Amino acid sequence: MNFHTQYFDLGRLDRLSYRRTAVHSLDPRAKVIATGLFLVTVVSFPKYDVAGLVPFLLFPVLAATLGEIPIGFILRKVLIVSPFAVFVGIFSPFLDTRTVAVIAGLPVSAGWLSFASILLKFALTVSAALLLVATTSFPGVCHALRRLGCPPIFVSQLLFLYRYLFVLAEEAMRIVRAWDMRAFAGRGRGATVFARLVGVLLIRTLDRAERIYQAMLCRGFAGDIPRLGTLRLRSVDLVFVAITAVFLGACRFFPVTEGIGLLAQGIWR
């Protein structure tokens, strides 16, 4: 996959947010609250509890299915950033070698359980955040945070960070295209040239950012970005938040996985 394909894939999450489904029609504040509750609940599990996290897979699966979001696209995004989680937990099996279980005659150390828990928590939280953006759009999430009481400077910085990614990618695409046109026969391909390209990209993006900021000041920017239209909580939004809270509470404080296993064992017999 080349740079141009990566650039056009950068805004696909926002393009998915334009669909009209039951999930997309929910109030952004309701989806932000539900996702926040989900993240806090998942992170609150002990580091050795892997089975208790399994029922939480239902949340992103339902959100992707009802929102008509391609699950493969979300999984690819999760895999792209998964090396960070692997690097964080890869040392656990070597530092915590206590045997806590025996599966099929093989001893399982506490470190492997901790490593599996880190990976599962990472997959759940990142997929939930991606689905929130895919069904709401990043500006929609930021405006929902603003309506929920977040400081305007914090929300504005998030919006600028996200929008400036596209400015940076656009400048980088122009530089890469010009470089490809001049680097024929293998010339101009080395660490020195790459360092110069990075320096040119930095200078051009800083200059572009300054022009954008001056244009915003000319149009009356005063630290807060207004939103066209109003948000209104409906009864269906409150029901969605309530059902999510009940589901998360049941999965957190009751042995749901153990109950499902006993039920399946009874049916099998």
Image (cartoon, rainbow, N blue to C red):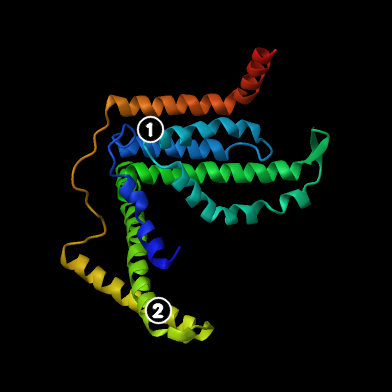
The residue positioned 61% from the left and 46% from the top of the image is: 119
In which quadrant is the C terminus drawn?
top right
In which quadrant is the N terminus drawn?
bottom left
Q: Amino acid type of disc 1?
A: Leu
Q: Quadrant of residue 101?
A: top right
The residue positioned 24% from the left and 54% from the top of the image is: 225
The residue positioned 33% from the left and 68% from the top of the image is: 170
Q: Amino acid type of disc 2?
A: Asp
**Which mark identifies residue 66?**
1
| Residue closer to the observer: 223 or 234 | 234
- Tell me where residue 218 appears, x and y as whole percent: 16, 68
Q: Quadrant of residue 206?
A: bottom left
The residue positioned 22% from the left and 51% from the top of the image is: 226
Question: For the residue carrying disc 2, how many other residues have a C-alpha within 10 Å: few (<14), some (14-19), or many (20+)?
Answer: some
- Tell me where residue 152 appears, x and y as whole percent: 31, 52
Q: CA distance from mark 1 to mark 2?
A: 43 Å
Q: Is residue 237 above or below residue 215?
A: above
- Tell me where residue 134 appears, x and y as whole percent: 37, 45
SS at badge 2: helix
Q: Which residue is mark 2?
A: 180
- Tell me where residue 14 appears, x and y as whole percent: 33, 50
In this view, which residue lies farthest toward the left?
Answer: 219
